[in-house]
Image (cartoon, rainbow, N blue to C red):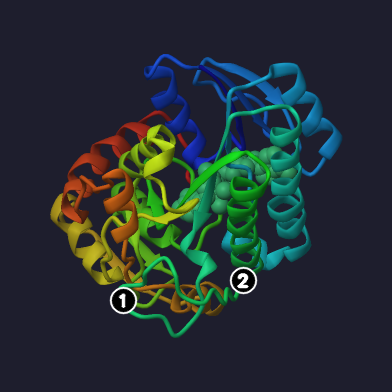
Amino acid sequence: MKILMTGAGGQIGSDLITALVAQGHSIVATDLKPRPSTPEVAWRGLDVVDGAAVDRIIAEEAPEVVYHLAAILSATGEKNPALAYAVNQTGTWNVLEACRTRGVRQLMFCSSIAVYGPGLPDPTPDDVGLRPTTMYGVTKAAGEMLCEYYRAKRGLDCRGVRFPGLISASLPGGGSTDYALFMYVDGVRVGSYQAFARPDTRVPLMYMPDGVRGLLELAAAPADKLTRAIYNIAGFSPRADEIAASVGRAVPGVTITYQPDPLRQGILDSWPRALDDTCARADWGWAPRYTLDQMTVDLVPKIRELLSGGAKLTH
Ligand SMILES: NC(=O)c1ccc[n+]([C@@H]2O[C@H](COP(=O)([O-])OP(=O)(O)OC[C@H]3O[C@@H](n4cnc5c(N)ncnc54)[C@H](O)[C@@H]3O)[C@@H](O)[C@H]2O)c1
């Protein structure tokens, strides 16, 4: 199957491309960024804010499915809300319209726990009032609603997941949960890390292999089993100091300290502490495979390998 991906050069894109290629699909990867050294797939420059360019590339490539990943993430978006609005809101509209008018069969959307706001039930189900506190969350909530609308009214099979903070051995994109990854990276690299969150910070997290598998399983689910367009999917919900303890078991002697950053701590405090993913489990059989400690065991050697290859994972 021919699949076009936006924002393919980011944290999820690199792992998602590998998984889709392994399934035998033909991928057209697009991004503002130039082609990375790997993976070896067709690569085209695309700014999703440019509606004419989005339309042109989808007309030319005629993909059956589009994975729309391009976005400005939460912490970066709060520093530049206008850019976050342009990329996440206008960009998503451009992609939806091009998919609809050019006969794309399915659009896969990546939403986020940032659609929620303070005062949530714990665990947080799919259907509670959405009161996001960031421009990122506002645009993701609107993107979800647009997906529901296009699915119901415009004949486009839109589906998506609300991802928790995703952790993988790659460069994160300015999200508020990056402290978790940097405990591993700096733990391995220099033996210490000063986290920008309080030790009792607890937000939903997920290991990337589970996240990618969730997206692929939802894409493949029979349409008549789906009762909604967008689904919560949960992995695990450790406190920051529980992540530090898990890192410490794999990297003995590591020291994690805490210096909360008001911007990112404020965002983290407005998010769910844990997600209720009952709907995804019931409709398409979702279940995570990795616990925190299982992720740590798998991730630490991958981070060692990445760092030994000279990767610069900067804060
Ligand atoms: N990583 C997470 O923890 C997480 C959690 C929840 C949701 N998501 C969502 O998943 C998707 C992918 O996230 P990611 O972690 O890979 O993010 P990322 O920041 O690593 O990658 C996003 C990509 O979008 C590209 N991009 C930015 N502006 C663009 C534009 N105008 N046109 C085209 N491309 C542009 C960037 O160059 C980057 O390669 C996003 O929609 C994000 O909101 C991610």
Question: What residue is at 47 percent from the left and 26 percent from the top?
Answer: 17
| Distance CA(mark 1)–CA(mark 2) | 22 Å
Query: Residue sitting at 73 percent across and 63 percent down?
Result: 80
Residue at image point 47% right, 45% down: 313
| 239 vs 151, nearest the viewer | 151
| Number of the label disc, if any, that sits on residue 134 | 2
Compare residues 177 and 116 and report the one nearer the observer. Answer: 116
**How many dots with numbers?**
2
Q: Residue furthest right?
A: 52
Residue 231 appears in which quarter of the rendering? bottom left
The amino acid pointed to by label 1 is Pro
Residue at disc 1, secondary structure: loop
Q: Which residue is mark 1?
A: 199
- Going 38% across and 35% down the picture, which residue do you hit? 222
Residue 314 visible: no
Where is residue 108 shown, x and y percent of the image? 53, 40
